[in-house]
């Protein structure tokens, strides 16, 4: 056995000191990095931490993923899975072994991603997370639309263009988030929880991004995002990728749109349809008003014609014309009686002249004078009689005139249909009557009715 050197300058480390130095050197030289490989020797003890070996065809390294970091990794990896992990290369001091502390894990390769997608979809579907009964209705006319997407992506411009074209009255509340990479899913979860409080006037949310590969869209396949969509207090419309792209977020959303533009169209009514509806309503209203006025004019003409026939003035006019006819007939009758009397006088006078005797003449003269007196008296009496009859007829005619009745303090009452009221039992309390007086008219309301005494 060789004797120990006695050089006082040599540095001697304890094993634990050396491993600490090695760990510091490794961690300083290799900051956080991504590593891809295949899992083997996977174990999960009661502590909840994961321990496994990550290998490829030529090498391997021991890895650890602690409970706080692996909580959101779904599904749980198995031996043989190809994964992509991010973390810190370090040295485990207790054994002096090189190890990789894993902070994030995701399937590597599209085949693995598809398998992870289908497994998560099946598990959440079995849990009932995608059930239609849990989905909220999207409002037909939103007051405001929340948009969760990248502030610099084309998806935002497509959404704004569609909303401006279809329904420029609505307000848009943007919550910008990364839509790709490890920071995307936590940012989306936070946005879904905070946007309803930040924008109280928003009543629907669009979660969107443009198209891409399965890896590019993977943030929308995270379980945390799906659960945040279902927990959101507002209805969520997904518009992720292109029409052929499907994500877990599409199944969890209250409504799925094939593209961001389609999502904007689903949450916004087309203002052009409203304008067409208003034009149709305006045309219908104009037509209805025109028809109503036409019918009212026709009814007014009918009422005017009936009023002209039933008006008291028209009746008085007819009675006056009848009176004039009677007066004409009376004058003609008097004229005829006078002519007959004069003709008889001429006849007697001619006989008198033919007789010639003085006595006969005297007697005839006396008789003639007597007859003349009698004739004059008869004519006078006849005229008086005719005048009396004429005055009686005129008085009777005036007594029958409705206006004469009105002058004695009576009134004519008509209901709303223009019918003359003659029976109090035909009226109801509250009914409005048109009352015609000798001079003027009044509207009267029926308070109560009395039966005939």
Image (cartoon, helix red, strand yellow):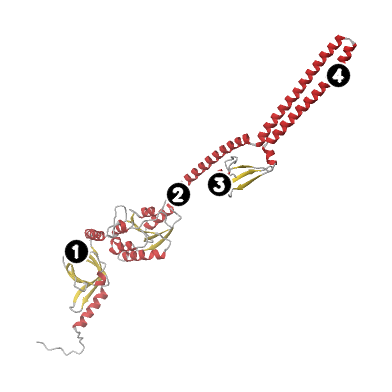
User: How much space separates mark 2 and mark 1, taking CA atoms?
Assistant: 56 Å
Quick check: 194 above or below 4?
above
User: How much space separates mark 2 and mark 4, taking CA atoms?
Assistant: 109 Å
Quick check: 168 above or below 49?
above
Mark 2 surroundings within 10 Å by alpha-carbon count, few (fewer than 14), some (14 through 19), many (20 or more): few
Residue behind mark 4 = 369
Q: Which of marks 4 and 3 is nearer the N terminus?
A: 4
Image quarter in which the N terminus is found: bottom left
Q: In this view, does 160 lie to the left or right of 382?
A: left
Query: In percent of the image, x 82 and y 14: which residue is there?
Result: 346
Residue behind mark 3 = 428
Residue behind mark 1 = 81
**Label 4 element class:** helix
Mark 1 surroundings within 10 Å by alpha-carbon count, few (fewer than 14), some (14 through 19), many (20 or more): some
**Label 2 element class:** helix
User: How much space separates mark 4 and mark 3, taking CA atoms?
Assistant: 76 Å
Q: Are marks 1 and 3 in contact (CB under 8 Å)?
A: no
Q: Which of marks 2 and 3 is nearer the N terminus?
A: 2
**Label 1 element class:** loop
In this rendering, which labeled residue sits more in front, label 4 or label 3?
Answer: 4
Residue behind mark 2 = 274
In this rendering, which labeled residue sits more in front, label 2 or label 3?
Answer: 3
User: How much space separates mark 1 and mark 3, taking CA atoms?
Assistant: 94 Å
**Label 3 element class:** loop
Query: Quadrant location of residue 225?
Result: bottom left
Image quarter in which the C terminus is found: top right
Query: Quadrant location of residue 196?
Result: bottom left
């Amino acid at each position: 056995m060789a004797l120990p050197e006695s050089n006082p300058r040599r540095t001697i480390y304890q094993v634990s000191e050396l491993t600490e130095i090695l760990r510091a050197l490794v961690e300083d030289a290799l900051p956080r990095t991504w590593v891809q490989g295949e899992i083997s020797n996977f174990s999960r003890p009661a502590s909840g931490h994961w321990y496994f070996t990550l290998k490829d065809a030529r090498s391997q390294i021991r890895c650890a993923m602690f409970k706080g970091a692996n909580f959101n990794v779904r599904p749980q990896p198995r031996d043989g899975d190809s994964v992509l992990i991010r973390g810190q290369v370090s040295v485990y001091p207790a054994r002096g072994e090189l190890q990789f502390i894993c902070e994030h894990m995701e399937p590597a390769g599209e085949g693995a991603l598809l398998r992870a997608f289908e497994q998560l979809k099946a598990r959440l579907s079995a849990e009932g997370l995608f059930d239609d009964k849990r989905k909220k209705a999207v409002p037909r006319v939103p007051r405001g639309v929340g948009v969760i997407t990248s502030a610099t992506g084309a998806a935002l411009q497509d959404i704004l263009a569609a909303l401006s074209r279809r329904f420029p009255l609505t307000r848009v509340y943007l919550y910008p988030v990364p839509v790709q990479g490890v920071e995307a899913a936590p940012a989306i979860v936070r946005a879904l929880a905070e946007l309803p409080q930040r924008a109280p006037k928003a009543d629907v949310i669009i979660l969107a991004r443009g198209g891409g590969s399965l890896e590019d869209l993977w943030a929308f396949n995270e379980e945390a995002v799906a659960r945040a969509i279902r927990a959101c207090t507002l209805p969520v419309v997904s518009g992720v990728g292109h029409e052929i792209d499907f994500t877990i977020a599409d199944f969890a959303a209250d409504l799925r749109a094939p593209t961001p533009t389609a999502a904007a169209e689903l949450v916004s009514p087309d203002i052009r349809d409203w304008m067409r509806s208003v034009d149709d309503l305006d045309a219908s209203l104009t037509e209805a008003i025109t028809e109503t006025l036409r019918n009212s004019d026709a009814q007014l003409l009918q009422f005017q014609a009936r009023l002209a026939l039933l008006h008291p003035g028209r009746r008085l006019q007819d009675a006056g014309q009848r009176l004039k006819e009677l007066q004409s007939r009376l004058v003609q009758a008097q004229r005829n009686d006078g002519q007959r009397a004069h003709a008889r006088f001429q006849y007697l006078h001619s006989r008198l002249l033919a007789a010639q005797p003085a006595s006969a003449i005297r007697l005839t003269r006396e008789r003639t004078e007597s007859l003349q007196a009698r004739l004059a008296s008869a004519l006078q009496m006849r005229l008086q009689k005719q005048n009396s009859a004429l005055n009686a007829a005129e008085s009777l005619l005036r007594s029958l005139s409705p206006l004469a009745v009105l002058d004695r303090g009576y009134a004519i009452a008509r209901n709303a249909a223009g019918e003359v009221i003659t029976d109090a039992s035909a009226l109801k309390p509250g009914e409005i009557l048109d009352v015609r007086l000798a001079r003027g008219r009044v509207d009267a309301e029926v308070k109560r009715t009395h039966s005939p005494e």
